[in-house]
Image (cartoon, grey):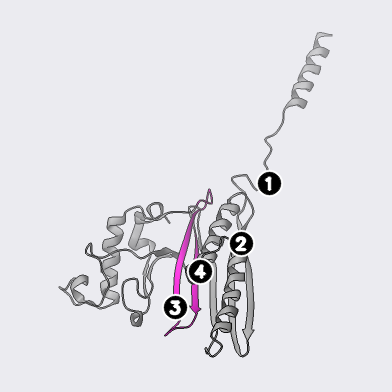
Amino acid sequence: MKWIFGILVMVLISCGKREPVQIVGLSENSELTFRTDSLIQESCVGENCAKLRLVWPVAEGDRRSGQINKVVEEQLIFLMQYGEDVSVSLDSMVRDYFTSFQSFKAEFPDSYGGWEIDAEGVVSYQSDNTISIYFTQFNYLGGAHPNSLVTFLNFDSRTGEFLSTDRLILDEVKLVNLAEQKFRAYHEVEEGKSVVDDGRFFLPETGFFLANAMGFRDGKFWIVYVPYEIAPYVMGYTELEFSREELGDVVRW
């Protein structure tokens, strides 16, 4: 009888053991994917129209997606900004945009031309460490010329957290030096003359600085200065690209 009792105990222990349960979307091996969403609207007063086109990536797959999508929506709201008022949601920002256009045309019926905002974001880089989303934006709300800008949103691939500059760049001093060298070559700054003394650029007393738009695209690291950031509008964008061989561990690949 003792051997029968022993077998029963072994069976009960075996039945009581549970394999680890993986919650879908929360496991370390779950896949983070992206789809594209868009919003395209138009509102006209006579022949003049306000146009809006927004295209952006939406993260899906696990809990990281919520953090990423929140930052992306905040970026869209930022790209929709005009004037001093800033709404707290994308939907309200869109409504305010068209309402403001209608009000402007009612107040100035003889004004010519329409408004336009066109912004698009794409996943430009994805590795085990870093995800970059690259945004381009064009807008014209009257005035002498349209405005445009580009920006990168960088995220930790493992957690979905937004990466601040100090987490994206691992050696800022070295990157500044490398960027200045490439900047000089890009704009053909005369040898022996400092970028400050060149006279074409907007530089503070502290000297050369890194652009606001930095991130990964096409397998390279990019530093992009938008018009007015470091040079006059007529000089356009300054786009500096760096391969992994050039930067090594200076940035978080």
* Mark 4 vs mark 1, CA separation in Å: 34 Å
Q: Nearer the viewer, mark 2 or mark 1?
A: 2
Q: Are marks 4 and 3 in contact (CB under 8 Å)?
A: no
Q: Position of residue 28 (x, y in %)?
A: 59, 45
Q: Position of residue 61 (x, y in %)?
A: 64, 53
Q: Residue at x 47, y 68 (%)?
A: 84
Locate residue 238: give its quadrant: bottom left
Locate residue 69: give its quadrant: bottom right
Q: Residue at x 67, y 41 (%)?
A: 22
Q: Position of residue 227 (x, y in %)?
A: 37, 75
- Location of mark 2 (residue): 58
Q: Along the line of sight, which residue is nearer the eye, 44 or 66?
A: 44
Q: Earlier in the sequence, mark 4 or mark 3?
A: 4
Q: Are marks 1 and 3 in contact (CB under 8 Å)?
A: no
- Location of mark 3 (residue): 147
Q: Position of residue 97 (x, y in %)?
A: 57, 73
Q: Earlier in the sequence, mark 3 or mark 2?
A: 2
Question: Tag 2's secondary structure?
Answer: strand
- Numbered circle sitting on residue 99: none
Q: Which residues are magenta?
A: 132-161
* Mark 3 vs mark 2, CA separation in Å: 26 Å
- Location of mark 4 (residue): 79
Badge 2: few (under 14), some or many (20 or more) residues near its Cα, within 10 Å? many
Amino acid type of disc 3? Asn
Amino acid type of disc 4? Leu
- Location of mark 1 (residue): 24
Q: Nearer the viewer, mark 1 or mark 3?
A: 3
